[in-house]
Amino acid sequence: MNDLANSTMTQNSQPVRIDFNTPELQRKRRIRALKDRLTRWYVLVGGLAVLAAITLIFFYLAYVVLPLFQGAELTKKQALAPAWLQQDAGKPLMIALEEQNLVGMRVSDKGQALFFDTKTGNELKRVDLPVPTGTQVTSIGADQPGSPVVVLGLSNGQALVFHHSYKITYPDNHKTITPGIDYPYGEQPFVLDEQGRGLDHVSVNVNGDTLLLAGSTGAQLQVLALTRSENMMTGEVTTEQNRIALPQMTETVKNIFIDPRQQWLYVINGRASADVFSLRDKSLNGRYKLSENAGTEVTATTQLVGGISLVVGNSDGGLAQWFMARDPDGESRFKQIRTFQMGTAPIVQIDAEERRKGFIALDADGKLGVFHSTAHRTLLVEPVAPGAGILALSPRANRIIIEAAGKLLPLSLRNPHPEVSFSALWGKVWYENYDEPKYVWQSTASNTDFEPKLSLSPLTFGTLKAAFYAMILAAPLAIAAAIYTAYFMAPGMRRKVKPVIELMEAMPTVILGFFAGLFLAPYLEGHLPGVFSLFLLMPLGILLAGFTWSRLPESLRLRVPDGWEAAILIPVILLTGWFALTMSPHLESWFFGGDMRLWITNDLGITYDQRNAMVVGIAMGFAVIPNIYSIAEDAVFSVPRSLTLGSLALGATPWQTLTRVVILTASPGIFSALMIGMGRAVGETMIVLMATGNTPVMEMNLFEGMRTLAANVAVEMPESEVGGSHYRVLFLAALVLLMFTFVMNTLAELIRQRLRKKYSSL
Amino acid sequence: MKKDSLKGWFKSGAPGVWMSGGAVAMAVIMTVGLLAVIAVRGLGHFWPADLVQATYKVPGQAQQTVIGEVVQQEEVPRARLKGAGLPVPDQGPEFMTRELIKVGNRDLNGSDFTWVVGEWLVDEKRPSELMALERREWGNFYGYLVSVKEEGRVVAQGPAAWGELQARLQRANTLNRQLQALEKKDIGAINHGLERLRLQARKLELEGKLDAAAQADMDADRAELNSRYKAVEERLTGLHQAFARDSLVARDGNGREVEINLSKVVHAIQPNAMSGFTKLGTYFGKVWEFLSDDPREANTEGGIFPAIFGTVMMTLIMAVIVTPFGVLAAVYLREYARQGPVTRLIRIAVNNLAGVPAIVYGVFGLGFFVYVLGGSIDRLFFPEALPAPTLGTPGLLWASLTLALLAVPVVIVATEEGLARIPRTVREGSLALGATKAETLWKIVLPMASPAMMTGMILAVARAAGEVAPLMLVGVVKLAPSLPVDGNYPYLHLDQKIMHLGFHIYDVGFQSPNVEAARPLVYATALLLVLVIASLNLSAVWIRNHLREKYKALDS
């Protein structure tokens, strides 16, 4: 050892010395070190950035979804005390705001409409309404939210109808709003009460050419229908007046509302009751108690946009939504749908939004509440005024003006997504025009007063239904195939079969979807009995083939080595399949009167869609088979050899070894394969989009279609308004999908890792 | 061994073996069967089928002559036909045949296809003079050629007409190519120039630099473009007139005569008179046309070239984006990050992202890339075009980026696997010789892992090429007005919407008004897509196996 060391020392002392420390080499080393550091930083930053970009998906989706669940926000602005309000302005009957939030209108009991600037409160224009001299304005009524039609009830039993309108012009590129009042039905008031008594309450509705006026004098109802018709030849307009006589009532009328389809007339009267009249057959539909509580009185009522629902506020600070819904016996009844509680003080005024099914309410303590009916959400309750007042909500529902204590209080309201709540998304909701609470997804419609139905339940149900039927086909097939490939199959065959099945995995789903929709769906429809008998005959055929094989003479059997059973079965399966499908028309004409599809719909009473869950099950089953197969095969194949050999050595048959040792050991891996397959089936888009009718129904029926979360996003996303509630709900659907598959896959991965550890310790 | 009795056989467990073997066989049959159906239907579409002429006699109705291609034949229970309201006699065999015949002549018949009952078709023949016209509108025409006209005058009639027709058709097709070139290239360039001038003016105006000199400059440019446009337009009108010069008169099975302008005809063939060899020639001609032509008639006829081009372009851009970033992340994870629970967690997360539904990526792409990123870019760099969005709308760039994000886990996983396969000894050897870590990475590790990166990239491309759902949100349209690459500056238009093979299948198969006519085309498109993706995957598998062989030698 020592010698060796010495000898090298002596050898080294002789040769030419190389100087490794020349300035040039030093510089080179520095550059190399710098490059090394730079690379390190580059990889670090770049790698982390890529990983961050991937995780950004999750955060961005959450960021878009979050505003859905935030409440409303109210900002108070400087109170206005304009000069005209301090002078003799009269009692306010109504305030209104126009679209741009720039001009407000105030109608007073002096028969005057005054337009004011909402920023400064300054008077813009004052219009004296053509109220006949010597009469006073006693009441006011407006058509449903969003309509410019207003009616004034006069002390002589007459009613004056007018529109308030706002013209926008751009003189010198400067936006100017010119408010105005027009009288499309003439400046002459209509006679509502022929005896000339003062009208306590009035209501108006315009539907096409028919103007409907309703008024009350004490407990008496007066209803007048005016139909305008134009003579085609002369262009002359004639107005026909029609008095509708309704059964009279005993108690004092508090409020009158007309259904926009002019089918119902709602009269709030007495302490807390509502009489609903049918305007079609001019009869009383029924008398309904609006409150069970004896001491409670109705203090304010309004129609929601669309006019179908009434919101009733009472003296206890409670609010309730009511509308007409059919009983199981087919009779329409006025029903309480949902209630809200604002405070304890009586509700003074309720005002409905013009574009959504939301409303705001003011109580006697000056507290303001913001609500949404469909979502059953109380978004905000906040004190805003010193006491009771009169309020107006702007058409875009972002500005409120309250006149209270001789001042105008402007408030700005931020309430972007009131229509979404947990119960609206996942629970049963009672929608307008529905007879009972239901799970419905219907996000858009052509009319503006549409109530969006954003229940994710039917979509989630559809997703799980599609995945369920896919798994019914895929799970047994894929797992059996995986076990056979990994355990029984001859290695030579395995090398050929595995790539073929894994090639299935790469098959674009759009091709599977198109195949399912255009080929499979019509084919199945025409060969239903054949397909069902196929499911029965296939196992029987395989067993029969296996048994026959075992009875064949040895000489023949030994020609095919073990592990090639699958190859023998290919002709058997083809033959069975051919037999079942050729038998199909015969079976059909023997048992099902020639057409099984008709038989299913007529005799069994089951709906049959051509693109149904069975088609999806087969196509999507096909798509997930390779996913399940490759992971399960891996799990079975990597069961340690020692375990199986030990079992076989102890005398177990290969089948016993498989069922009692191999499958048990590999079961976590098989389970994780199923989970991954499920995750894929849940998120699959194109197949369900193309192979189902995409109707969001909640039926487990094998012969009906469904709409899945993923397909729904693909269909509706391109046309949803960016930043709107619908857009965000679709993001929520995507987030739900992401979370679901992510959790499933992570669990599966963890199970597999544990399994791998277990194997390595064995 | 009690192999004799059924009970013993069941006890031995053999049924389980057979059943599971059956599952494998079924999976293989399903895969191969699907491919076979698509291949047969897709390839069969281009074969010039014989035309059949027959008399169709529905009991109790006037008889009529049917000319067309038999597309499908099936046996149907008599009861079902009766249920459909057909006047089927009560007595007779249990089954009847039903045939789907492509009768063409949509302008005369209202639809291209008709179902007939085979038993009622009599007097079937295949006259060799029967002619099939492939038209630019109204689908195919089947019938007899009567005469050929030039500007309304008959120039050929009877047997001579066919040769005359072919010659004139060739002329018309040459003119059509010239017209297309003029319309697409020249006019496209002029329009592009005008649009750029408009944007330039708007930009100067926004910056407050639009003075008289600049205005005059642009006016001069505009005038020049306009005069060029005038010249092109004149040539165009001339060509159009020449193009519409000739026409033919044809007679359908029921003796109705129609005059069809040759500008509306693509091909005229007499399939019954063709030999197998000529048919083969026509077949490949049609296949080539399918691959290289633009679609016609709401995508239900013609070729799919723009879709192929769009798919290739998008996947290319995606591959260019995804490969370096995927490799970077893999190198970080495998070579630089400290191996511990955090890295393991990241690895699991990356793995799982490959299993996240594609539509989720589409939603993200639309929300983040298109609206947030694209919107900001528009405000910063293209204010002159606003309110029309430039990049703030779905387009090629965002489609590629979204797919890149979707495919990056694939590249990361594959590259990591490749890096893990490189034996430690190789790395340590390099370090021991004095190389820095960066040098080892560049000169030793990455070259050795390059086949793995290739595999990753190919798998990513295969995944991206087949994905449709996210693309529906971020930039694919049913009909793009022009290709994303052309001769106008900046040559590659990343903001343009593209066509895509997968989306083409969805759109033509499910959104088109004439699904029956489009069906063969969808099969052909599907076949093309399957072939592309299968070959990509097989090459990835081959590279991977090759790689394993290579490292086997290193390990020992």
Image (cartoon, coloured by chain):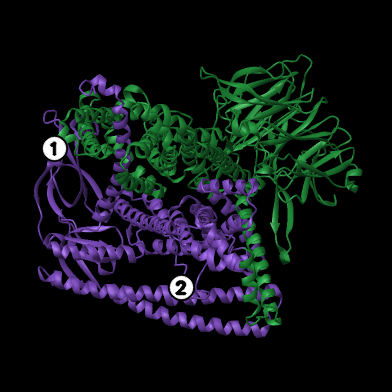
Q: Where is residue B376 in the image (x, y as percent from the top left)?
A: 65, 61
Please identify the quarter of the rendering in which residue B429 is found: bottom right
Q: Residue at x 38, y 38 (%)?
A: A482
> Which amino acid type corresponds to the residue marked 1 in the rendered image?
Pro
Q: Chain B is drawn in which colour?
A: purple
Q: As drawn, is A756 to the left or to the right of A494? A: right
Vertical arrangement, residue A706 with respect to residue B70, above or below: above
User: In the rendered view, would you say A589 is above or below A443?
Assistant: above
In this rendering, the label closer to the viewer, 1 or 2: 2
What numbered label is drawn on residue B59? 1
Residue at 30% across, 41% down: A490
In percent of width and height, residue B100 lies at 22, 45
Residue A124: x and y in percent read 81, 52
Q: Which amino acid does label 2 sit on?
A: Asp
Task: Work out whether A743 lies above or below B254.
Answer: above
Label number found at residue B486: 2
> Dot 2, how many residues are within 10 Å of its Cα: few (below 14), some (14-19), or many (20+)?
some
Disc 1 or 2, which lies upstream in sequence?
1
* Near-viewer residue (A77 or A251): A77
Q: Say which chain is green.
A: A
- Circle 1 SS class: loop
Which one is nearer the viewer's eye here, A89 or A19? A19
> Do discs 1 and 2 belong to a common subunit?
yes
The reply, left or right, for residue B277 in relation to residue A280 is left
Residue A608 visible from this viewpoint: yes
Splitting the image into 4 quarters, where does residue A370 fall?
Answer: top right
The structure residue drawn at horizontal position 57% and vertical position 39%, both measured from the top left corner, is: A743
Q: Is A336 on the left or on the right of B462, as rendered?
A: right
Q: Mark 1 lies on which chain?
A: B
Residue A597 falls in which quadrant of the image? Answer: top left
Task: Kindly tell me whether residue B82 is visible in this rendering.
Answer: no
